[in-house]
Image: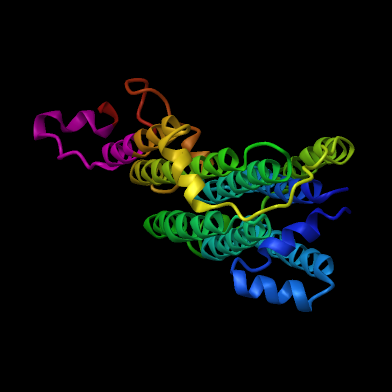
Amino acid sequence: MNTLTLFLLASLLLLAIGLAGLVTRRTLVGMLISVELMLNGAGLAIVAAAKCTPASEVHGQLAARFVMGLAAAEATLVLAMILVVQRRFGKVTLDEVSSIRAPGTGRPH
Amino acid sequence: MDRAIEKILATIWLPFDGLEVLIAEYLPGQRVAALAAFGLYALIILAGGLMAIGSRNLVRAMLGLVLTFFGVAGMYLLLASPFLAFMQVLIYVGAVCVLIFFAIMLTRNTSEGEESRLPGPGTAIYGLLAFALPLAVLVPLIVRHAPKLQETAYGQTETRLLGQGLITGDVFSFELISIILLVAMAGAVFLAWRRPEPAAGAAGRGPAER
């Protein structure tokens, strides 16, 4: 049990919590929150691994920053999707969204 | 537990040179202090994460998420990466949380929304499985295959080196994330764009036609 193990266990905790939230949440907003948790865990694991092993720590931190940028882009897109779903279905629960189908095969509501 | 945490603490417990010297001179129990800080941050992460996935009020869930972000920022401080901790607060707490708050408010999904009901027993079982399976698979792996740590001291990562990396070796990832952000922004605007209402003759076709 060394330092890296401790940090990896913390990021694993974030992954597990985020996955559980992703399964149990009923709305798209709740799922977005869970995905952000998991992305945080990924960043923490990358930085800890790069810092504590002989790997290049600069690369590790830049990769973590890449993850942060991806999280921001993903949150932006999900916000737009939530807006579209809200406008079309009136609410953003998964039960509603699962009835999405291609245009022309019937109106979803 | 090895001396690595002690080394980490000696360099970054507080990322200021003067205080660092002070602590190194006057605080012999550095390792204990670093472990205590780690435990505190882990506790913050756990509490915030449970609040984020368990709260029936989405605004409270977002506050739990903010708590987790701060806990992870503290972990970055313990890893001698103060600039990354600052970025974590700036990007996640500053930008992503505002986006999530907008999403909550625009869907009016605060306290009496769909999330106010507790999940059914089936969903709860799935949730427990989703929580336990990664732990069951990965914890033994992580503990058993702990890699050998580097022997040199853990210096604080210089921000100058990060900037140099961004414009030399890692310039591709820099450009890539720029393009991704631009495309995401354009895509978000495109998705959320409210089309003008169709003319009266085409009204029967409705918005599903677009």
Q: Position of residue B135 (x, y in %)?
A: 80, 42
Which residue is at a point 44% across and 57% down the rendered structure image? B104
Which residue is at a point 41% across and 54% down the rendered structure image? B99
Q: Position of residue B45 (x, y in %)?
A: 68, 60
Give the colour scheme shown. Answer: rainbow
Q: Position of residue A81 (x, y in %)?
A: 39, 40
Q: Is any atom of residue B54 visible in this view?
A: no
Tell whether position B189 is magenta.
yes
Position of the N terminus of chain B by quadrant: bottom right
Position of the C terminus of chain B by quadrant: top left
Which residue is at a point 36% across and 43% down the rendered structure image? A80
Classify residue B72 as left or right of residue B128: left
Q: Position of residue B125 (x, y in %)?
A: 77, 44
In the rendered image, the vertical position of residue B68 relative to residue A99, given as above or below = below
Residue range (magenta)? B182-207
Quadrant for residue A89, please give it.
top left
